[in-house]
């Protein structure tokens, strides 16, 4: 548990209704600071009352309203009722030595002694329910009368003095109520300006007399309550506590028609000694009600006055400053600004993020980004919303591997919450309609809808020029969706909230498809999930965004010159030029490996395995789209003989198809393994690793063809490739990770990791081609560390994750994302150079140097200071 000094309070979750906290929990409460402010405000009221009585100064202003101010759902009612309950039991707690706080007599700012004070609380009044014009003053009288009747019924000893006080009190109730009714009838007359001056003066005098009579009645009322408490009678001679009547009015601002009149009457009649009024309201809403009232007083024909809306607003503010002085206001905490609140339920205490994220994982298998500096969208913006959301998750059944009924139930509940409550809370009307259009279909159509929407929205917006060009040039992919969310989220607040809602929606859709994709067996639902995931990714994790995640490269190529180019992504590469290597560089000065009856497995397989891994590593950067809108490329071995007399590698090459041709030993030979147009991307290994059979096995077989050349023995191919262990390595890793080096299905994590990488690489300088490999390793290590940070957080909040080595013995399905990344064969090989050919660095550099001369295309940034636009 976190250090209590660092906590912003404990939020005890028991239900969605208003909660009355025990006084002894105030110190650790979420509302701890607000309770302290309320204690000081009440202490101020008590001291001001005593000062007036000591000075016999009846003209002194009385400010006895303590308003709990905040927006809807911040806990105003709970805090107010909890504080009122603490006041109710304060005197009893003092007598029994269990008080949590004290009130002190203060003079000239100095604390003199602890006050002996008692409070009587009447039932709270829900202002929002008084929509039929009920008089708040009469309601308070009725509440007081009801409390008195209860007291009278339970009084055991009724002395003559009690009966006298009772009769006097009842007469006062009757007189005040009659006068209040008479005043109401007078105020409701339509012909107000026609009545006589004497009548008007009489009504004014009656209003003042009602307040005076009410003040006197309150003193007798409290005297009777005090005298009928056994505890007081026993100490009547030695103690005489100062006694206050506490009145609570909740949600006054929700009474649209009468809210102002209620507040005005509370101020008119309740500002008397020994009364404390606790009030809960949204300040902005109350101010709006005051403005509405003041505008209604302006004659419709007075256009000049109607123009002065600013003056009316100022008048409303001045009125509230008078009725609710700033020093008496208790401003409720905003959940969005308290980052270290703890939630307590069923005896378990945890921070709010952990409380929600743990349940999202247990109930839906969904992990979220935990490293954001800003509040996550699932942490909610208000106290009420958080409690409701938490209880919704808590009520869900826990997800198991083979229970798709539970998955569908939980998915449906959270989907409806996302598309209704979350969207309604965060989006304006136009954004809601846009969200509905974008999400009317399931994946992958919904993500493609965003791609189309972004392309259309970027039209005519200079700051989105580069995004528009990139979307048009590179086409749809998962990476373009990530980039779109990032760029559009920077346009304005409305776009930011829309992107958050879409992230929540895509998170649900992707994790649902991943659940079915990861199930054992080969059924129709699993195949559909696989197709939907592949179509959604469409060959690229980063898309054109990779352009922003890696520095530009300067390449120097012999006979060709120097070029500076963007390496992150390059499209339309001629694969025969881009993926071409000298055989002797791969095979230690050999042109091929003899494969015949004398083939020595023990001696040759390690070398063949290193060459195959090297070729697969070099090939991992080339994109294989699942949903093709234009011709791509295929892995195909093409042997190219060099004329021995010609040292110019750019000329006089003769292409030979490998099938049916014999190769001359010791002749110089290049190996090209691709045919068609391909796209290079530093993150394409992620999508390639997802699809071993479609993307990796064909290149592995091409690698064998290149190694064996004209002397290959097809009947030995399968046995030799099996002996390299590459297929088994991918199989073991895929069983652990389900084929995902980066958790694309947890899009919130992937998006934020890529976003931080993009921001990290923002100011990187141009590098040389020989530095590319080390820089790539830095990028991959950064991604691994960010995934590891997420792993650590989930472990620290008590969730079990299974490791790659111990996967079979673990009950949980949750894995270490960092291990899934670093144990991907691609990453293992690139970080373990001894498993590749010894001159891998040179071969890799040669491929990088060839890229800018392979007819590829990139989108260059058109802005000198791109991070000032939406791109960053």
Image: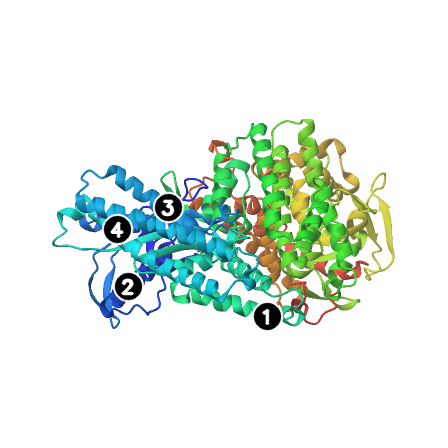
Q: SS of the residue at dot 2?
A: helix
Q: Earlier in the sequence, mark 1 or mark 4?
A: 4
Q: CA distance from mark 3 to mark 4?
A: 21 Å
Q: Earlier in the sequence, mark 1 or mark 3?
A: 3
Observer-nearest of 608 and 447: 447
Which residue is pictured at 60% across the width and 30% down the height? Answer: 519
Mark 3 or 4, closer to the camera: 3
Residue 493, x across and y down, in percent: 62, 59
Residue 49 numbered mark, or none: 2
Which residue is pictured at 38% across the width and 49% down the height? Answer: 141
Residue 149 figure quarter = top left
Residue 160 numbered mark, or none: none
Q: CA distance from mark 1 to mark 3?
A: 39 Å
Q: Which residue is mark 4?
A: 90
Residue 112, x across and y down, in percent: 19, 66
Q: Is residue 762 visible?
A: yes
Q: Earlier in the sequence, mark 3 or mark 4?
A: 4
Residue 515, compared with residue 643, is above or below; it is above
Are the residues at dot 2 and dot 3 in contact (C-beta closer than 8 Å)?
Answer: no
């Amino acid at each position: 548990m976190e250090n209590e000094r660092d906590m912003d309070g404990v939020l005890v979750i028991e239900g969605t209704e208003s909660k009355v906290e025990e006084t002894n929990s105030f110190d650790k409460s979420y509302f701890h600071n607000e309770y302290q402010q309320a204690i000081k405000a009440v202490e101020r009221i008590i001291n001001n009352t005593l000062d007036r009585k000591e000075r016999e100064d009846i003209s002194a202003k009385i400010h006895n309203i303590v308003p709990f101010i905040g927006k809807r759902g911040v806990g105003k009612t709970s805090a107010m009722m909890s504080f009122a309950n603490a006041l109710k039991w304060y005197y009893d707690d003092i007598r029994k030595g269990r008080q949590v706080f004290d009130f002190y007599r203060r003079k000239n700012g100095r604390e003199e002694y602890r006050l002996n004070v008692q409070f009587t609380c009447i039932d709270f009044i829900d202002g929002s329910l008084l929509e039929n014009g009920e008089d708040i003053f009469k309601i308070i009288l009725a509440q007081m009368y009801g409390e008195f009747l209860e007291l009278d019924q339970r009084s055991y000893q009724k002395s003559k003095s009690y009966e006298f006080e009772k009769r006097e009190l009842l007469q006062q109730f009757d007189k005040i109520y009659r006068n209040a009714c008479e005043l109401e009838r007078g105020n409701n007359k339509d012909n107000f300006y026609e009545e006589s001056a004497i009548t008007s003066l009489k009504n004014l005098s009656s209003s003042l007399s009602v307040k005076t009579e009410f003040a006197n009645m309150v003193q007798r009322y409290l005297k009777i309550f005090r005298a009928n408490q056994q505890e007081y009678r026993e100490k009547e001679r030695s103690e005489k506590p100062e006694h206050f009547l506490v009145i609570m009015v909740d949600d006054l601002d929700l009474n649209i028609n009468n809210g102002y009149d209620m507040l005005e009457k509370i101020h008119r009649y309740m500002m008397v000694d020994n009364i404390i009024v606790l009030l809960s309201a949204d300040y902005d809403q109350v101010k709006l009600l005051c403005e509405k009232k003041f505008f209604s007083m302006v004659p419709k024909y007075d256009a000049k006055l109607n123009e002065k809306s600013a003056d009316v607003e100022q008048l409303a503010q001045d009125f509230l400053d008078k009725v609710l002085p700033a020093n008496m206001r208790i401003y409720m905490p905003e959940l969005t600004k308290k980052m270290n609140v703890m939630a307590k339920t069923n005896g378990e205490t945890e921070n709010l993020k952990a409380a929600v994220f743990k349940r999202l994982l247990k109930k839906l298998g969904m992990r979220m980004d935990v490293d954001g500096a800003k509040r996550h969208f699932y942490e909610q913006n208000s106290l009420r919303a958080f409690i409701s959301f938490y209880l919704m998750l808590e009520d869900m059944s826990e997800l198991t591997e083979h229970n798709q009924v539970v998955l569908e139930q939980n998915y449906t509940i959270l989907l409806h919450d996302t598309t209704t409550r979350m969207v309604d809370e965060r989006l304006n009307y136009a954004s809601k309609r846009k969200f509905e259009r974008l999400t009317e279909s399931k994946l992958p159509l919904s993500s493609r809808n965003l791609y189309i929407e972004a392309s259309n929205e970027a039209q005519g917006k200079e700051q989105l020029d580069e995004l528009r060009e990139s979307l048009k040039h590179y086409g749809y992919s998962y990476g373009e969706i990530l980039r779109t969310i990032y760029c559009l989220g920077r346009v304005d607040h409305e776009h930011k909230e829309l992107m958050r809602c879409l992230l929540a929606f895509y998170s649900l859709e992707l994790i649902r498809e991943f659940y079915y994709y990861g199930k054992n067996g080969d059924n129709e639902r699993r195949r559909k999930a696989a197709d939907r995931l592949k179509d959604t990714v469409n060959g690229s994790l980063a898309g054109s965004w990779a352009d922003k995640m890696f520095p530009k490269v300067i390449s120097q190529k012999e006979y060709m010159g120097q070029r500076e180019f963007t390496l992150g992504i390059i499209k339309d590469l001629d694969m025969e030029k881009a993926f071409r290597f000298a055989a002797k560089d791969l095979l230690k000065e050999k042109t091929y490996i003899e494969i015949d009856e004398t083939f020595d497995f023990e001696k040759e397989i390690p070398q063949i395995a290193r060459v195959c891994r090297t070729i697969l590593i070099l090939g991992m950067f080339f994109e294989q789209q699942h949903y093709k809108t234009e011709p791509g490329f295929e892995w195909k071995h093409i042997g190219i003989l060099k004329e021995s007399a010609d040292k110019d590698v750019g000329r006089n090459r003769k292409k030979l198809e490998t099938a049916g041709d014999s190769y001359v030993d010791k002749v110089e030979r290049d190996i090209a393994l691709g045919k068609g147009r391909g796209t290079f991307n530093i993150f394409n290994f992620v999508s390639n690793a997802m699809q071993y059979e479609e993307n990796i096995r064909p290149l592995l077989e091409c690698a064998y063809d290149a190694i064996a050349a004209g002397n290959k023995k097809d009947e030995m191919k399968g046995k030799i490739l099996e002996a390299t262990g590459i297929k088994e390595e991918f199989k073991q890793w895929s069983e652990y990770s389900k084929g995902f080096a980066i958790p694309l299905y947890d899009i919130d994590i992937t998006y934020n990791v890529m976003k931080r990488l993009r921001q990290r690489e923002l100011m990187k300088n141009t590098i040389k081609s020989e530095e590319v490999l080390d820089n790539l390793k830095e990028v991959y290590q950064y991604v691994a560390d960010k995934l590891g940070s997420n792993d650590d957080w989930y472990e620290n909040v008590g969730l079990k994750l299974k490791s790659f080595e111990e996967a079979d013995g673990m009950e949980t399905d949750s894995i270490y994302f960092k291990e899934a990344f670093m144990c991907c064969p691609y990453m293992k090989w690139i970080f373990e150079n001894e498993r590749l050919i010894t001159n891998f660095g040179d071969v890799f550099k040669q491929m990088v140097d060839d890229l800018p001369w392979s007819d590829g295309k990139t989108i260059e940034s058109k802005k000198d200071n791109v991070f000032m636009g939406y791109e960053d």
